[in-house]
Amino acid sequence: MRTFTQGADVLSLLAEGRESRQRWHKPLREGGKYVLGRDSEADLFVPWERFLSRKHMTISVQRDGVKFQVLEGEKNPVFQNGDVVTEGFLKPGESIVVGETRFQVLETETATDEQIVTPLESVTFLPGQLRDVRFEDADRRLEALLRLPSVIAGARDSAHLFAPLTSLVLEGIRYAEAVAVISLEADNAVKIAHWDRRNESDGRIRPSTRLVHEALVSQKRPVLHVWDPAVQAESRFTATAELDWAFCIPMEHAGTSRWGLYVAGRFDEMYLPSESGVVAALSADIKFSELITEVLGSVERLKRLEGEVSVLRQFLSPSILTALKKTGDPHGLNSGILEPRECNVTVMFCDLRGFSQQSEAGAQNLHELLDRVGLALEMMTQQILKHGGVTGDFLGDAVLGFWGWPFPSDEAPLAACRAALAIREAFATRSLEQEALAGFQVGIGLAHGRAVAGKIGTSDRVTVTVFGPVVNLASRLEHMTKHLRVPILLDEPLADIVRQRMPAQVGRIRKLAKVVPYGMETPVLVSELVPPLSVCRELTDEHLRSYDQAVDAFLQGDWESAYRMLHQIPSSDRAQDFLTLEIARTGRVAPPGWDGVVTLPAK
């Protein structure tokens, strides 16, 4: 057991990724030189960080810190205090970041052999071992347990929970002298979050580091230490000199298991360490304390689960939530179904038009403008969820939605198109009925392809999102609706699906142009998703066929024919303006070497 006598200081390196399991803490030998990287043969192996190379940098350990040097040829950046660096020096407490992983140098005090005090008896309690233990002072303990719900309900945070909790434990355990809520820090040092003593004049409690590590790290179960008073009398400086016994029980807090309830006390003339009944006498106290920690852990897990579910309900449609419940996991949070994975998805970017103008006009009443924008965003998300989609991020006045996750479906692309048409219709009709939406329009981009989708987050915050080129393309298509002057744009894979499988009474397709979006190199054949004739009477099926023929003529370089056919489209249709202006710019003659592709100058 380490005491508070000053020992030697050594350095260590703490690596922490985004997820709780992406973590290690390793000692560094003074004068040692280590290679850090994603190679399993590296001295400091970091398998989770994709921005690390197989051998990314060297770590040289000195007495007062470590020197790091990025290996030659490595391009992925290393950040120190926000700046990109290739070499530097880290003192204890300082850190660098690569990708999503932070590397921090820590200073740890070591113990010497003279500071070790071996307990007279050490007992680890296995699961179920305390089930049949009978309580003494049952009334006393029951009265304390009855106070536990009010203690939990009245705690706004940890600070307001730990104080009455330690008091409650002292009340329920007759011979306890000191109680503390403790945690193991990143450097494996024991930190006291809150402590209480029956006699305050006895001073601050000093937990046994050895006992805490056995309970929270090596055994991960309740552990009891009983010390020999004769040895303790000769060990004035040890953490246990004033006490005869202590036990530590793991407890879940803040989403981790590196917390514990530490209880210590003295022997009473009723039972002495030489008697065989010591462990039996303390077993009831341990069972009582374990019951308290289990209740606290259950309440915390429930709160965390409720928080995750309440967040997920904002992203997942009712149909998906219903399907998740059929998996056997009521909320699908532990089954792995919501974990990120690669799949076919249809991605939608839906942007609110007219926001900038409304901001300028409503600068004196921003709260009213915020309410109006909130109403518009709510309308978008309602249609995404109604049609079985998932809502991802809110990007200012835009919404990201996607289909095809967490369950694959051949209907996902069509559902996304139905949602887009419903959003267009909602803004077209409600903007006339509701003054709050006056002046707002929408631009929608839809793309279909492979991406990684799933749930990401921490113990107290969860979100869902989608990554991949198809997401970037959907965003570009949404921006292109401004140039092509239509509300909804689709990429070619999705347009083909609509042509083959969507009934005309639901939605129709017309080609618009072959373009290179701003910031991209590959040409994209874009199409418009047009409402059915019952909703969009100004554009007949014959008009759409004529438009497709005009686009084909434009792509082939017959601009005169394309120009003539475009003028057969009703003048109220704004889509024709894009090609008409392109054709008129060069006198209705395709430029030399024409390949049918229009490069857009900006987003």
Image: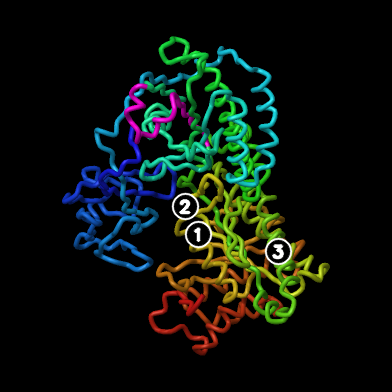
| Residue 235 located within the stretch drawn in magenta | yes
| Residue 149 located within the stretch drawn in magenta | no
**Residue type of the residue flagged with mark 1:** Val
Figure check: 237 above or below 544: above
> Mark 2 or mark 3, which is nearer to you?
3
Q: Earlier in the sequence, mark 2 or mark 1?
A: 2
266 vs 101, nearest the viewer? 266
Q: Are marks 2 and 1 in contact (CB under 8 Å)?
A: yes
**Residue type of the residue flagged with mark 2:** Ala
Labelled disc at residue 451: 2
Disc tally is: 3
- Give the x, y percent position of residue 302: 62, 36
Asked if residue 435 shows in the view, the reply is yes
What is the distance, in whole Å, between disc 2 and disc 3 at their CAs?
29 Å
Residue identified by numbered label 3: 374
Q: Earlier in the sequence, mark 1 or mark 3?
A: 3
**Residue type of the residue flagged with mark 3:** Gly
337 vs 513, nearest the viewer? 337
Residue identified by numbered label 1: 471
Please, which residue is most extreme toward the top here?
276
Q: Quadrant of the N terminus?
A: top left
- Magenta stretch, residue numbers: 230-252
